[in-house]
Image: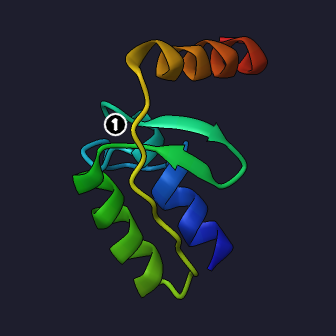
Amino acid sequence: MAARISHLIFGRKDAKDDSRLPYVRRPGVVWIGQSVLIMPATLAWELAEKLRALGATVTTARIRIDRDELEAFRRRRRRGLGT
């Protein structure tokens, strides 16, 4: 189950079908770390449904965050990942 969840969220290097974009690479998604993602509500509900179907426990919450604050998370992730 963990591998399937990881592939859904982060993708696979050996995937033959590039049309299935991993969630962390979709527009508006910010990976904060570990198991925390910020994303548009429609994507969040879609991902939550898929994860629950795989047997995962999922918690979602609506939050409001200023664009500047969100960009600070993006910059931190890029520096931490070396990209």
Give how far across and how far down residue 42 sits, in percent: 22, 55
Which residue does the numbered mark 1 point to in the structure image? 26
Residue 64 visible (yes or no): yes
For the N terminus, the image quarter is bottom right
Q: Nearer the viewer, residue 60 or 75?
A: 60
Q: Nearer the viewer, residue 2 or 16?
A: 2
Determine whether the residue tagged by mark 1 lies in a helix, strand or loop: loop
Which residue shows up at 53% across the image and 88% down it?
A: 55
Give how far across and how far down residue 37 sits, in percent: 53, 46
Looking at the image, residue 44 sits to the left or right of residue 51; the answer is left
Q: Amino acid type of disc 1?
A: Arg
| Above or below, 28 relative to 21 | above
| Above or below, 3 relative to 25 | below
Circle 1 packing at 10 Å, graded few (<14), some (14-19), many (20+), is few
Give how far across and how far down residue 30 sits, in percent: 49, 33
Looking at the image, residue 27 sits to the left or right of residue 29; the answer is left
